């Protein structure tokens, strides 16, 4: 079965009534949790990005409170899960500034968590990859924002 392209789907959606479009969206939301979360973001939170970022930061804090600091293996699993959730929220937003802010916050919380990051090659590499992602996303921002975030990145290194 050949799947239609995005352009073809967009063309067909324009031909549907508003009620038919709503039915399709609701049907999509039933099958995948990520789709439902994306719809929630687009409908309720996309207008106020600052409060969305704060809510995600609170989620990151809650996840780091559950990190088992006595067992490094379990800590790594929890940290990876937290990073996956953070990346999902970054994808929902699609804004580079949101990506930079959330990744900087994630790295700050990881650094201040009390874990011996640099003794574990996995955590050390994870931390370094996030800094590289931050720098890459930062290159897409306006020069003034780049200057503001540069100080925070230097503190992470």
Image: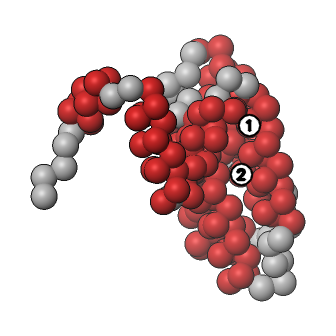
* Secondary structure beneath label 2: helix
Q: Residue at x 48, y 60 (%)?
A: 31
- Answer with the quarter of the image where residue 47 lies: top right
Mark toward the viewer: 2 or 1: 1
Front residue of 78/119: it is 78
Tell me how far mark 2 sits from mark 1, CA to CA.
Answer: 15 Å
According to the image, what is the colour scheme of the structure?
Answer: secondary structure
Badge number at residue 18: none
Q: Position of residue 28 (x, y in %)?
A: 45, 50
Front residue of 156/102: it is 102
Earlier along the polypeptide chain: callout 2 or callout 1? Answer: 1
Badge number at residue 53: 1
Front residue of 6/30: it is 30
Q: Which residue is mark 2?
A: 107
**Contact flag, marks 2 and 1 (Cβ < 8 Å):** no
* Secondary structure beneath label 1: helix
Q: Residue at x 44, y 26 (%)?
A: 18
Q: Position of residue 70 (x, y in %)?
A: 84, 84
Is residue 35 visible in the rendered image? The answer is no
Q: Residue at x 52, y 50 (%)?
A: 29
Quadrant where the N terminus sits is bottom left
- Answer with the quarter of the image where residue 112 lies: bottom right
């Amino acid at each position: 079965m050949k799947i239609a392209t995005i352009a073809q789907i967009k063309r067909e959606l324009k031909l549907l009534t508003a009620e038919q479009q709503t039915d399709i969206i609701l049907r999509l939301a039933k099958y995948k949790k990520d789709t439902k979360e994306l719809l929630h973001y687009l409908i309720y939170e996309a207008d106020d990005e600052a409060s969305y970022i704060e809510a995600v930061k609170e989620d990151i804090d809650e996840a780091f409170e559950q990190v088992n600091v006595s067992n490094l293996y379990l800590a790594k699993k929890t940290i990876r899960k937290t990073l996956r959730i953070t990346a999902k929220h970054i994808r929902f937003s699609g804004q580079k500034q949101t990506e930079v802010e959330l990744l900087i916050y994630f790295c700050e919380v990881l650094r201040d968590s009390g874990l011996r990051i640099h003794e574990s090659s996995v955590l050390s590499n994870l931390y370094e990859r996030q800094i590289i992602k931050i720098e890459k996303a930062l290159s897409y921002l306006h020069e003034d924002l780049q200057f503001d975030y540069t100080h925070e990145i230097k503190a992470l290194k």
